[in-house]
């Protein structure tokens, strides 16, 4: 096909979907900070219950379950953050909490890979988190399960095993801001569109990965996620 751009970036990155041969194309990636009280506490932060807060990752930060992830550059303290991810399938802008779930296509297991040392340095100086959060392979995704197949969000278990040892273990009901609350709030600032992802925050138990680490994440009812960290190139 003839392209009218000077470089060919081809199609958007896509995520496999359970029982669907086509991929879920990724448009934007939004992430919520401090959405589990025990994780906020382990990071030394107070929970701010006045409003959720967000950061973003490039769609090009996507990495699929089953991949090898080279240890990221520029960090000596790269952390795993296991998260429940919402995949948007319909437009939503200024949507009410009551109507918010109508915009949801499905859900997936995700890892918000974080260069903790760079994030901490940015926090200390009041600078943006981009270097700590938005880098290649920093948005790891398992296959997406459609919302009707998953059913209502309740107290499903969310876990992460690091080299076979359970390090993160919580319930989706532990989230401070529920998914409808997050979507309603986020849609006050953005026109959410099909292809957008929302990482809903991590439970307690975050920690460093290293070359050779195997990360296996689960949420009850979702396709599990697994990646191996390899030596820095
Ligand atoms: Mn996170």
Image: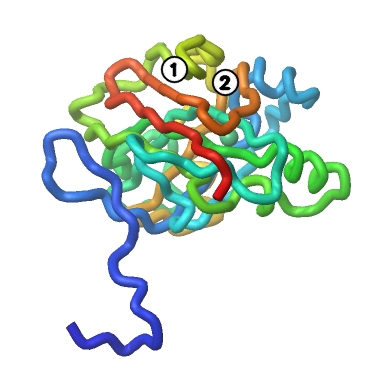
Q: Can you say whether 197 is above or below 166 in the image?
A: below
State whether residue 62 appears in this view.
yes
State whether residue 180 appears in this view.
no
Residue 224, horizontal then vertical, whole percent: 32, 24
* SS under mark 2: loop
Question: Which residue occupies the foreground of this view, 164 or 171?
Answer: 164
Give the tally of numbered discs. 2
Q: Can you say whether 130 is above or below 47 in the image?
A: below
Residue 97, horizontal then vertical, whole percent: 43, 36
Identified at 36% across, 28% down, the residue is 225
CA separation, marks 2 and 1? Answer: 8 Å
Question: Which residue occupies the foreground of this view, 74 or 11?
Answer: 74
Number of the label disc, if any, that sits on residue 158: 1
Q: Mark 2 or mark 1: which comes first in sequence?
A: 1
For the rendered model, the colour scheme is rainbow
Residue density around tag 1, few if under 14, some if 14–19, many if 20 or more, within 10 Å: many
Rendering quadrant holding ligand 1: top right
Using the rendered view, name the quadrant where residue 4 is placed: bottom left
* SS under mark 1: strand
Identified at 57% across, 30% down, the residue is 80
- Residue contact between numbered discs 2 and 1, judged by CB atoms under 8 Å: yes
Identified at 50% across, 10% down, the residue is 166
Q: Is residue 211 left or right of residue 63?
A: right
The quadrant of the image that shows the N terminus is bottom left
Q: Is residue 185 left or right of residue 119?
A: left
Residue under label 2: 203
Identified at 64% across, 50% down, the residue is 73
Question: Which residue occupies the foreground of this view, 175 or 137?
Answer: 137
């Amino acid at each position: 096909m003839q392209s009218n751009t000077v470089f060919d970036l081809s199609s958007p990155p896509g995520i496999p979907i359970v029982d669907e041969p086509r991929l879920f194309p990724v448009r934007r990636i939004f992430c919520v900070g401090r959405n589990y009280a025990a994780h906020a506490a382990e990071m030394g932060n107070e929970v701010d219950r006045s409003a959720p807060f967000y950061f973003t990752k490039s769609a090009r930060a996507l990495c699929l379950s089953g991949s090898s992830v080279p240890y990221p550059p520029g960090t000596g303290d790269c952390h795993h953050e296991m998260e429940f991810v919402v995949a948007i399938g319909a437009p939503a802008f200024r949507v009410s909490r009551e109507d918010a779930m109508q915009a949801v296509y499905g859900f997936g297991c995700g890892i918000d890979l974080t260069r903790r040392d760079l994030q901490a340095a940015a926090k200390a100086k009041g600078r943006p988190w981009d270097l700590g959060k938005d880098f290649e392979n920093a948005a790891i995704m398992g296959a997406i399960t459609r919302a009707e197949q998953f059913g209502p969000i309740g107290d499903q278990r969310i876990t992460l095993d690091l080299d076979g040892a359970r390090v993160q273990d919580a319930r989706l009901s532990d989230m401070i801001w529920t998914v409808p609350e997050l979507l309603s709030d986020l849609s006050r600032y953005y026109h959410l569109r099909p292809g957008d992802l929302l990482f809903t925050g991590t439970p307690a138990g975050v920690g460093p990965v290293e070359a050779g680490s195997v990360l296996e994440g689960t949420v009850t009812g979702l396709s599990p996620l697994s990646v191996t960290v390899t030596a820095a190139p």
